[in-house]
Amino acid sequence: MKRILVILVAAILIAPLAAQESLGSSPDFSASILLGSDLLPSASDPTKLESWSKLGLQPDLSLGKFGIGLDLTFRFQLYPDPNTPLQIYEPDWIPQAGTDQTIFDVYLPKIMYVRYGLRGIDPFYIKLGSIDDFSLGNGLIVSDYANTRFLPDLRIFGLQFGLDGNMFKFPYLGIEALTGNLARMDVIGGRIFTRPLAFLGESLPAKLQFGVTGVLDRDPLAYTDAADLALYPAADLVYVIGADLTLPVLRSEIVSLNAFVEGASQPSGALGLITGVGGKLIGFINYGAQIRALQGGFIPSYFDSNYDFYRDQRADYVLSLPSPEAFKLGWLASLGFQLFTEALELNILIDGPFAPKPGTATDDSGAYPHLKGGVTLAEGLLPGIFLSAGYEKYFIGRKATFFKDLFDPEDAVIGMSINYKTGATVLTLGYVYSWDPTTQDFDVSSSLSASVRF
């Protein structure tokens, strides 16, 4: 607990001091009042879902590079029985008996975020709260990691941090770090990088980066239902380590290109190696291509956007592997478009092995193609409508042919958030469907709300 308090105090002190350089900017304050309903697990029986009304206030303040947002939402039921006029959803406010929840688990998430600076823009940035798409290196270990997958049921309070030596005119060193849950310090990781030839000034070799990445999950069973704990006897502490070389070959408004090579090792000793390129074309096209060599059982992008859904199964799988198998060659391709001044964003990523699918079904995800797609429509492009949606499919071809299996929802995570704005009022409908291989069924989260922003 002392570590958590030290981190919070440091962040609170550092951010306002750093924000002094932006004191010329006027504060930007807004707030939303929420009214709606969420479909949540029953406090008495988590296997059952109940509809709970919600009323909340979400204030948001930004000053220059500093910002803070709160989520003060009450979920309740009116007259759940004749003798109870009002029932508050207790898991939002009280640590639950029979769990290892602490007061930090419950109350830290009332802070949606505290931030200073922006990743990729400022040499120093820090954000506490929700993490949406954090990657380390070139994504072989951590790719688009998020701690928001249990919303609206559960908000998790994490941390992401970055410091580049350029801030101190010492471009030789830098660091990026994250923890998925600051209250538990379960997923902890970071990347330290150096530019060993930075003394060569603005030349191409001066931009070469050598990085070392390490990520640890101290508790892969953190979100596993008590009834399912016995299914994962091998799921214990998991760590993944790796190193990379990255060179920004081109940097212009027309084209950018990064070339890289990265390798990683997982607990069973299985190795993964990738080499490829990525960048941007004519300002609005993102692209990427990789060649991969993965030993059997190696899970690329182990900490991905849906990691919290599948962390118990992954840990049990990699810790149960008897020994590394032979290397298999694979590939990855990604393409994205940012149109209408980034008001419309489309992205698709697909990867898989060059070899045909295994003759016998396996839980080795690297033995099958994998697809991830998303679309974001920002406010303003269509009158009153803005949305985001995503589809991620694992183990394509394990049940049937590639194209028949591609849109089979089994082994998939499907999410969407649709918003309609009229005046100051926004109506929001959100759904997340995630396949649970334990129950062979979907876990469903849904939310319907109306908010008024002022």
Image (cartoon, rainbow, N blue to C red):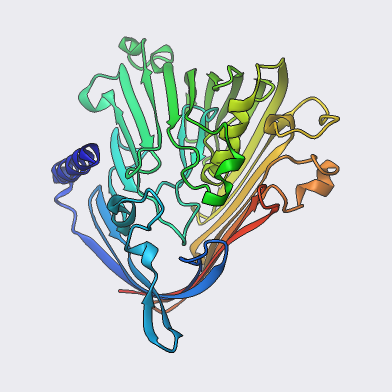
Residue 268: image quadrant is top right
* Percent of width and height locating residue 393: 68, 45
The residue under the point 79% across, 39% down is 398
The residue under the point 40% across, 51% down is 99
Residue 370: image quadrant is top right
The residue under the point 36% across, 63% down is 92
* Percent of width and height locating residue 225: 53, 51
Viewer-side residue, 38 vs 238: 238
Q: Is residue 65 visible?
A: yes
In the displayed structure image, the side of residue 302 where residue 13 appears, left or right = left
Q: Quadrant of the C terminus?
A: bottom left
* Percent of width and height locating residue 380: 48, 66
401 lies above or below 262: below
The residue under the point 15% across, 51% down is 24
Q: Quadrant of the N terminus?
A: top left
Viewer-side residue, 194 vs 4: 4
81 lies above or below 211: below
* Percent of width and height locating residue 176: 36, 30
Residue 185: image quadrant is top left
In the displayed structure image, the side of residue 47 where residue 399 appears, left or right = right
Viewer-side residue, 388 vs 302: 302
